[in-house]
Image (tube, rainbow, N blue to C red):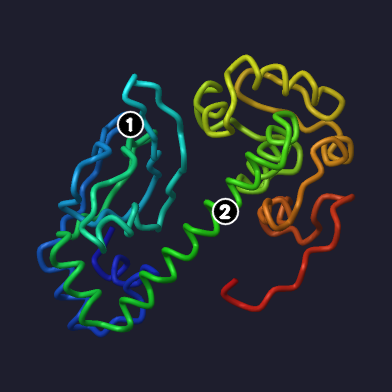
Amino acid sequence: MPESEVANLPIFRNLSARRRADLLADAVQHGVSSGTMLFEQGEVPNFQLLVLSGSAHLFGRSAEGREVLIEVVRAPDLIIPAAVATGAPYLMRARVPEPSRLLMIRAATFREAVAADPVLAQAVIGSLAQQFRRMVRQVKNLKLRSSTERVGCYILALAARQGTLDRAALPYEKSLIASELGMTRESFSRSLSNLEEGIEVQGSTILIRDAAALIRICRPDQLIDGDIYNLAPRGAKTPVSGLPRPIERPPGH
């Protein structure tokens, strides 16, 4: 990615040219292949990582070696800025599920800039706020819904993100999706069967045969599933029939 495009990323967009230059002076763009481990939980950050393209999976791992997918960070977002800003150990490990490109800024340089520049501090606060809201939505999804409801809303949200009305392509293996949704692979498969009134499974593609039936079963909630309200092909303006009217929210929320 050209430096001019990097400078226009949300975290840098409103910074002075001098501040951007200072941050990017010894930063490195780094391409990584699928399966690359970026860092382990317990490590102290050496860099602030920013996803330029692709994504990163954040996992929690127990002392016995059990691993669960906690969050997916997609471009153009920072990876765990809370740990970098405080110099604290990572609480999760990060692995790349697809070929991705990262911007690596030295952690000390990043912390010094955040402390010195209110504009950058505000941008980091904005990133932290978005990540906090995603985490709250995830907790609500896990604690307030049955496994079938979680899977149904996941399919609708995935179709929304992919810009299709009639299908959702699973982005990674079903066992990993099950982990993200707080269930076993077997429970994930049973939930798909429970949704057969509205969907048809064809390998790694979920065909949405009856969106109204799927919505009736999984009962999406805008405060958890905001993306579902944009479920339409790119360029279309009509959401899926049957969803309640989205709540109007002020810009930036």
Specify few, some or many for label 2: CA neighbours under 10 Å numbering under 14, 14-19, or 20 or more: some
Q: Position of residue 73 (x, y in %)?
A: 43, 48
> Which residue does the numbered mark 2 point to in the structure image?
136
Q: Identify the residue at the far left of this view.
A: 26
Q: Identify the residue at the far front of this view.
A: 63
Q: Is disc 2 in contact with disc 1, using a CB cutoff of under 8 Å?
A: no
Q: Is residue 52 left or right of residue 220?
A: left
Q: Is residue 180 left or right of residue 212?
A: left
Q: Residue at x 85, y 35 (%)?
A: 217
Q: Position of residue 34 (x, y in %)?
A: 33, 31
Q: Residue at x 21, y 48 (%)?
A: 30
Q: Residue flagged by tag 1: what amino acid is it?
A: Ser
| Tag shown at residue 54 | none
Q: Residue at x 49, y 62 (%)?
A: 130
| Tag shown at residue 34 | 1
In front here: 90 or 69?
A: 90
In front here: 28 or 192?
A: 192
Please identify the quadrant where the C terminus is shown: bottom right
